[in-house]
Image (cartoon, rainbow, N blue to C red):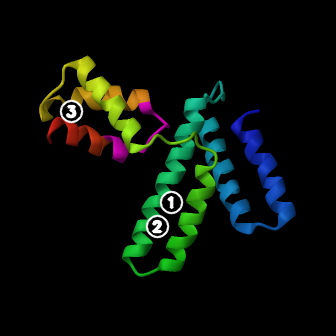
Amino acid sequence: MGMMETIANDMKVAMKSGDKLRLETLRTLRAAFLEKRVEKRPSGEMTPEDEIGVLNSALKKRREAMEIFRNNGRPELADQEEKEGAIIQEYLPAQLSPAEIEAVVRNTLTALSASSPKDFGKVMPAVMKELKGKADGKLIQETVKRLLGG
């Protein structure tokens, strides 16, 4: 079953249970998936990578909004964004721990013979390709910089 069908089924469950926050979050996700499908015309077929990309984009928006609300003294709105982010997180694959990310980065550094901050440009794309959807890009970037001594 594809992600769209899963979300549609979960929307029905949320409607029946009266969970308004979950329902609205799922509606927003469904709209994002439909936009991506239109963008991919003429085939309209979405790959699992496309689905993860849509979910990651939605989660990133929630995190950014949450930070803005917290910085501007709106904790109630920040809490709502945090709850929506948790709902979106349920549909993403399990995220790697910082230790697992560091292991992948170290392997990539060894494979590419990278050792200085100048190598960041060739290391980062290789690591991102391997960890796409499995870890937060910001955390990956910080780990690469730290290990390269940047």
Q: What's the CA distance linking mark 2 and mark 1? A: 6 Å
Residue 57: x and y, percent? Answer: 50, 47
| Left or right of 138 in this view: 47 | right
Image point (72%, 34%), residue name? 2
> According to the image, label 3 marks what residue?
120
Q: Quadrant of residue 148?
A: top left
Is 134 a magenta residue? yes
Q: Amino acid at mark 1?
A: Arg
Residue at the right extreme of this rendering: 16
Residue 65 appears in the rendering: yes
Image point (54%, 66%), residue name? 81
Image point (45%, 33%), residue name? 132
Residue 62: x and y, percent? Answer: 50, 60
Residue range corresponding to the magenta coloring: 131-140
Q: Nearer the viewer, residue 60 or 36?
A: 60
Callout 2: few (<14), some (14-19), or many (20+) C-alpha neighbours within 10 Å?
Answer: many
Q: What's the CA distance linking mark 2 and mark 3? A: 29 Å
> According to the image, label 1 marks what residue?
62
Callout 1: few (<14), some (14-19), or many (20+) C-alpha neighbours within 10 Å?
Answer: many
| Left or right of 85 in this view: 34 | right
Q: Nearer the viewer, residue 122 or 37?
A: 122
Question: What SS does tag 3 mark?
Answer: helix
> According to the image, label 2 marks what residue?
66
Residue 137: x and y, percent? Answer: 38, 43
Image point (87%, 62%), residue name? 16
| Left or right of 24 in this view: 64 | left
| Of marks 1 and 3, the one in the foreground | 3
